[in-house]
Image (tube, rainbow, N blue to C red):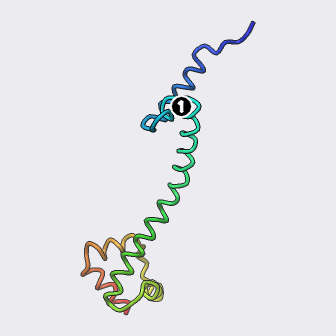
Amino acid sequence: MRVKRGTVRTDKHKKIIKLAKGFRGRRKSVFKLAKQAVIKAGQYAYRDRRVKKRDFRAAWIVKINGAVRKFGITYSDFISLLTKNNITINRKLLADLAENDPKSFEAIVKKVQ
């Protein structure tokens, strides 16, 4: 007797097609193309979960750099002064202070100068 797939193949295909929902063209409805698209999307998602962290850190650095230059310091000098004075504030918090609470940020800059 030969083995017939029954609902197994249909279920596997439906699972992939469901994951491809929202894709354009035949990539959302044709199994072979949908499978390739879903695999590629997964690779991008995995990679970009790490890239997102880099992008945020870069954005924080830009904000801090812009804020400290008003006080005549560069970003690298500011970070080195923070380290020498044993002030441990992460870049995310520094960038938030620089953007939303300039007075507090100014106090930190004055303290390290």
Q: Residue 2 lies in what quarter of the image? A: top right
Residue 93 position in % (x across, y down): 36, 71
Q: Does the image show residue 68? A: yes
Residue linked to disc 1: 16
User: Which one is nearer the viewer's eye here, 108 or 61?
Assistant: 61
User: Which one is nearer the viewer's eye here, 29 or 25?
Assistant: 25
Q: Residue at x 31, y 74 (%)?
A: 97
Left of 15 or right of it: where is 109? Answer: left
Residue 69 position in % (x across, y down): 35, 87
SS of the residue under disc 1:
helix
Q: Residue at x 64, y 15 (%)?
A: 5
Q: Residue at x 29, y 73 (%)?
A: 99
Residue 68 position in % (x across, y down): 35, 85
Left of 99 or right of it: where is 31? Answer: right
Q: Does the image show residue 19? A: no
**Label 1 amino acid?**
Ile
Q: How would you rate the neighbour count of disc 1 (Cα within 10 Å): few for under 14, some for 14-19, many for 20 or more?
A: many
